[in-house]
Image (cartoon, rainbow, N blue to C red):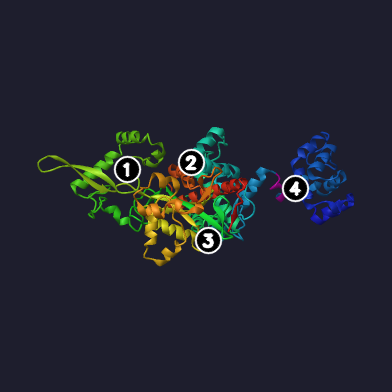
């Protein structure tokens, strides 16, 4: 077999164009020739022995190789003279790569890992052993065309983008993404000897969602996306999602400093220009399982748990409010008290099909709330807070009596998602409120969002009449000073329809009319409101549809999913704001 130097010398002797031939052309020529040996033989007479190397190539083969390797005809003949013996009587190394089956045998024999450096390469990531801990590190170059969502399953990135877009604009759950896919694409038939199936699962949809979103995040911040290789797939991306959530919590959404002509009004006073910036705040019920102890933000090990690990001992305590006795038996949620057991029985009965049908019928007329009251497999009655149960017991005279008890036999859910929105529709910030829409929590939310940033001139909130009292009389001077130059008006709709005329404080402190910079004169001389203060209701209509999708998510993925939904919507809204010629910019 000739060496590389001998092959080059042979090409030089046969062609005057040898210096222009690329190494890639020569390698391609060699590999293609090993694939078309039978075609070359077909053009030789039958007297030619198959084991004898053809001295020259047929004209048809020269033409084909010239086109595929981008070589002149003379160069094809020169290359053939140099490598024809390798092609016809190729050694073991060449035979190991001459076709797909040979490649598979080579990998089976020698393995695919580079054991000296400890790296194993995959289509969209590589595995590196870093001091005893194996890490899955995703490539930091351009986005891959396919994403590996399980050991043997891959999804095209474009398909994941479609699923994600459906979630943003049509509130399609992962399960429904699977159903749509199955309806649109016929079942894939795999070879019978394969040990894997071609069934799409909702977990693959969510894993594709996680991988693509995290890849985009790390590419945008020029950081490396890495996850533990040893972890199971269900928890593999938890730490990466937590880091994403922490970044959003610390730095806010990318558009937190957004401004445009719809959310900033420039007015002139005494020959000076002043920019008036307003935001609107409102809460919307979405909810996920959380610890049953009020205000506790501890993580649940499983979404089926009632308490976090810190309060796990409460699983053995009676669930009736005010009772601290141990439960009567394993599986029970009440103590030995007859009334408490009767209340639990009432709760259990409430989970039966007949009771649920009755309750669902009564709620059918309130379509917007239906998704918020879906129950969990006859196990949960309340939607997150203590509920009243009528305990029916018999006294010593065998008379039945009814007593109302407050208890929490089911799981507690987070109370609401609070949003701060610019009048143009850009969501500036979001926070999960665990127990209630407390005014102190709303005030802290505003302070945390705009600390070390330019504050809005106006913070419009449905219950500003109560919030303003809380702030103006706050014992902390820093809180009072932070809100000192912020107007606290109630939006026009709620002020006219929800607030009492007899509330003197509300009428004098939170009346939108008090702030003339919120008004402008219309074409007919009438007063109009400059800012769209109803944008929160419009945004809530979009955001609230995620309730049935998110209601069984764990805390980490819940935060990640909602943050990503807002991030994706912001991208579309930013384009729309630009198209409306409202001149968006970032401070």
Which one is earlier in the sequence, the residue at label 1 or at label 2?
A: 2
Neighbourhood count class around disc 2 (C-alpha, 10 Å): few under 14, some 14–19, many 20 upward? many
User: In the drawing, what numbered circle is on residue 381?
Assistant: 1
Residue 88: percent from left, percent from top? 77, 44
Q: CA distance from mark 4 to mark 3?
A: 73 Å
Dot 4 lies on which element? loop
Q: Which segment is the magenta one?
A: 93-98
Residue drawn at x 65%, y 43% as measured from the top left: 101
> Can you see residue 229?
no
Q: Tell me the element at label 2.
A: loop
Position of residue 404 relative to residue 127, above or below, is above
* Distance Cα–Cα, label 2 vs label 4: 55 Å
Q: Residue at x 19, y 46 (%)?
A: 339
Helix, strand or loop status at disc 3: loop
| Label 1 – label 2 distance at C-alpha | 23 Å
Q: Is residue 94 magenta?
A: yes
Q: Residues within 10 Å of mark 1 (few under 14, many from 20)?
A: many
Q: Which mark is residue 173?
A: 2
Mark 1 or 4, nearer chain start: 4
Q: Determine whether, in the image, residue 566 is placed left or right of residue 497.
A: right
The residue under label 3 is 454
Of mark 2 and mark 3, the one earlier in the sequence is: 2
Residue tagged 4: 90
The mark lying in front, picked from 1 and 4, is: 1
């Amino acid at each position: 077999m000739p060496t590389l130097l001998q092959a080059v010398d042979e090409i030089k002797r046969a062609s005057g164009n040898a210096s222009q031939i690329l190494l890639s052309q020569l390698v391609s020529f060699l590999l293609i020739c090993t694939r078309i040996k039978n075609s070359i033989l077909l053009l030789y007479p039958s007297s030619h022995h198959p084991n004898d190397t053809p001295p020259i190539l047929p004209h048809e083969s020269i033409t084909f190789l010239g086109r595929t390797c981008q070589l002149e005809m003379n160069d094809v003949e020169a290359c053939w003279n140099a490598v024809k013996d390798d092609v016809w009587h190729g050694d073991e190394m060449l035979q190991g790569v001459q076709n797909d089956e040979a490649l598979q045998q080579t990998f089976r024999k020698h393995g695919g890992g580079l054991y000296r450096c400890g790296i194993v390469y995959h289509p969209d990531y590589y595995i590196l052993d870093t001091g005893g801990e194996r890490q899955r590190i995703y490539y930091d170059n351009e986005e891959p065309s396919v994403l590996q969502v399980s050991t043997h399953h891959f999804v095209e990135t474009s398909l994941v983008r479609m699923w994600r877009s459906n979630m943003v604009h049509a509130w399609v759950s992962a399960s429904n993404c699977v159903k749509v896919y199955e309806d649109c694409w016929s079942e894939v038939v795999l070879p019978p000897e394969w040990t894997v199936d071609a069934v799409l699962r909702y977990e693959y949809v969510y894993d594709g969602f996680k991988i693509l979103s995290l890849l985009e995040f790390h590419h945008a911040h020029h950081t490396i996306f890495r996850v533990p290789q040893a972890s199971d797939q269900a928890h593999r991306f938890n730490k990466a999602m937590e880091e994403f959530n922490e970044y959003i919590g610390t730095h806010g959404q990318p558009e937190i400093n957004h401004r445009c002509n719809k959310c900033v009004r420039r007015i002139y006073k005494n020959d000076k220009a002043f920019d008036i910036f307003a935001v609107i705040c409102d809460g919307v019920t979405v909810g996920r399982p959380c610890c049953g102890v009020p205000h506790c933000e501890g993580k649940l090990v499983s979404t089926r748990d009632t308490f976090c690990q810190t309060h796990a001992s409460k699983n053995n305590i009676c669930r009736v409010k005010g009772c601290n006795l141990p439960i009567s038996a394993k599986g029970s949620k009440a103590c030995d008290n007859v009334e408490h057991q009767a209340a639990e029985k009432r709760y259990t009965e409430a989970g039966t099909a007949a009771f649920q049908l009755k309750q669902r019928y009564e709620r059918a007329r309130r379509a917007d709330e239906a998704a918020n009251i879906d129950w969990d497999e006859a196990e949960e009655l309340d939607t997150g807070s203590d509920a009243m149960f009528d305990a029916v017991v018999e006294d010593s005279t065998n008379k039945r009596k009814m007593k109302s008890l407050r208890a929490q036999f089911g799981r507690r859910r987070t109370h609401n998602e609070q949003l701060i929105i610019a009048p143009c529709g850009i969501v500036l910030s979001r926070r999960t409120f665990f127990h209630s829409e407390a005014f102190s929590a709303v005030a802290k939310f505003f302070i945390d969002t705009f600390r070390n940033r330019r504050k809005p001139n106006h913070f419009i909130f449905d219950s500003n009449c109560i919030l303003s009292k809380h702030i103006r009389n706050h014992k902390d001077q820093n809180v009072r000073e932070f809100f000192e130059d912020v107007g606290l008006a109630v939006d026009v709709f709620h002020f006219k329809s929800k607030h009492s005329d007899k509330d003197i404080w509300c009428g004098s402190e939170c009346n939108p009319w008090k702030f003339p910079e919120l008004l402008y004169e219309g074409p007919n001389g009438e007063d109009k409101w400059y800012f769209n203060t109803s944008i929160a209701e419009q945004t809530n209509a979009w955001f609230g549809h995620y309730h049935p999708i998110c209601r069984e998510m764990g805390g980490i993925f819940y935060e990640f999913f909602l943050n990503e939904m807002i991030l994706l919507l912001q991208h579309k809204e930013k384009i729309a704001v630009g198209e409306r010629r409202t001149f968006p910019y970032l401070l």
